[in-house]
Amino acid sequence: MVKEYKTIKTQVALPYEIAYGATWTRFFEGFKERKIYGTKCPQCARILVPARAFCPRCFVDTEDWVEVSQEGSLVSWNYVNYRYFGMPTEPPYVGGLIRLDGTDVGFLHLIGGFGLSDLEEVKKNVKSGMKVRAVWSDERQGNIMDIRYFEPIK
Amino acid sequence: MGRAVAVVGVGQTRHGRRMDVSYPELVREGVMAVFEDTGLTPDDIDGVVSGTMPSMMEGVALTHFYFADAIQAVGKPVLKTETCGSTGMSIAHTAYYWIASGMADVILAVGHEKMNEGDSQATMTTVAEPFYQRPFISGAPGVFSMQSAIWKDRFGLSDEKVREAAAYISKTHHDSAFDNPYAHIKIRTTIEQIVNARIITYPVRLLDVCPNSDGVCAVIFASEEKARKMGRKVAWVKGIGYRGDEYFFGDSDKAEWVSAIEAAKQAYAQAGIKNPRKELDVAEVYNPFTFQEMMLYECFGFAAPGEAPDLVLKGTFARQGELPCDPSGGVLCTNPIGASGLIRVAEAALQVTGKGGAHQVPGARLALAHAMGGVAQFNGVMILGSEL
């Protein structure tokens, strides 16, 4: 018999109030109006989304705001089938990396609008390279989940 | 490169679910192991560097404070290095820089994690901000599954071939773990079981993914003068490289993964390596996911872009192959994250000093150790050799 030693059950629950700053604030104000904004780098001319305060490559301010397309191509996806504290929705769910039309980086969000319980069905609906479009919540709070998911464009 | 630096000894705990010890007791077990291996004592140590993945994995924020006694850091310079999954490699780099700079002669490096005490995947989502990336990371398997899918599509590889090669990797590493006395997961498995295992984040299934492990690795680095005085076989640091990508997952190319490619290039240039597959005798690649491991082989020049699955299925990276990768069973079978990168260094050192035991690659003289971390963001490499 291996001796069992005691454990203590404990929790760390810390409240935070985290500053959005001007750029995230403006980006999510756009969400309330069902608009997705990016910023354009004055040096490399890339359109970055979500909107950025500066271009990570050129290290210059990006003050040129552009409304970007709500449609794009699916670059990559996964099918999440396990539970963890803080997950965005009940599994199974599909995560996607989307290249919104006219932008120069990938945008992360969920893929949905079809049955998710059966992987084989999901594989019929989700293909890399397919066109997708944003589906908005009716009631928007100004956060990333104001977009419910991106759905395949038939 | 600064002054010459050697790994003069290594220690590991038995890795696994270690609810038989408190966290500092586990750390001390690893530290005692390296003192036993080297015959050195705390008095011989000039400074200590330690680290964990994010500290909140175990709910105690300042581990080098908590472990001051267990790592025998009292009265000495002490550093903490933390770079997510690549923490263990960054600890090794810190120790290297410390000695190479001439500021110390003997450094104790300790990587540790006790993943079974918290919610590892929830902890990992906290490496990202809450505005945008956090909801979509889905723990570690989420991002790394997406990354390997980008790689597969880039080179037009079929799902079937990639699945078959990933299963081969899983099978061979799980078999290798039986030859590693410290490995956590020791199960005999079959290709059929691997390809039908429960889905975690498709295409990753249970036997394609690393476990939650508790464990510690401790390594002592020394200057040339101190290393030679010890009169034992040591592993010389031949080259190191480290790179990070931009923060946002969608900003950088993850299929031809720039940070992995450039980190290896830097280390190869220092070590004078031109053809890594031919010149290296063994590699310990940080491999928590089978699919991603193949992609890393390409980043390190072990295979041409898109070629890795074919070479895997030919046995090129198996124990008897041209370049054995992860003869220890790798991260796939043992993953106390803050220790995992340092375990790669320790395993590489064991190989080039001929102390690999049942998983020794015969005659190994030059080895690559690697670790990666962040939201598919960081890569670190260290090359170790039997000759200076």
Image (cartoon, grey):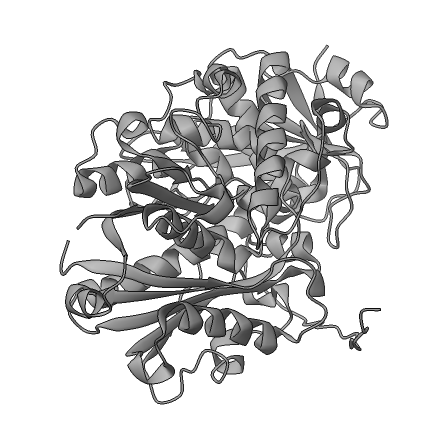
User: Residue drawn 31% across and 58% down?
Assistant: B93
Can residue B118 be seen?
no
Q: Nearer the viewer, residue A72 or A9?
A: A9
For the point 73% across and 53% down, the residue is A86
Q: Is residue A9 visible?
A: yes
Q: Could you say where residue A140 lies in the image, as x and y percent from the top left? A: 74, 44
Q: Is residue B16 left or right of residue B7?
A: right
* Residue B307, quarter of the rendered image: top left
Q: From the viewer's perspective, tell me whether residue B2 is left or right of residue B386.
A: left
Give the position of the C terminus of chain A as an image quadrant: top right
- Residue B257 place in picture, x, y as percent: 40, 32
Quarter of the picture containing the N terminus of chain A is bottom right
**Residue drawn at (69%, 23%) of the image:** B191
Q: Position of residue B123 (x, y in %)?
A: 63, 58
Exactly how many numbered labels are in the figure?
0
Name the foreground residue: A46 vs A13.
A13
Kindly indicate the quadrant of the structure image that contains residue A100: top right
Q: Which residue is pictured at 17% across the width and 63% down the height?
A: B224
Rendered view: A100 above or below B104: above
Identify whether B388 is placed above or below B160. below
Q: Quadrant of residue B342?
A: bottom left
Image position, residue A20 (x, y; %): 54, 57
Q: Is residue A141 left or right of residue B54?
A: right
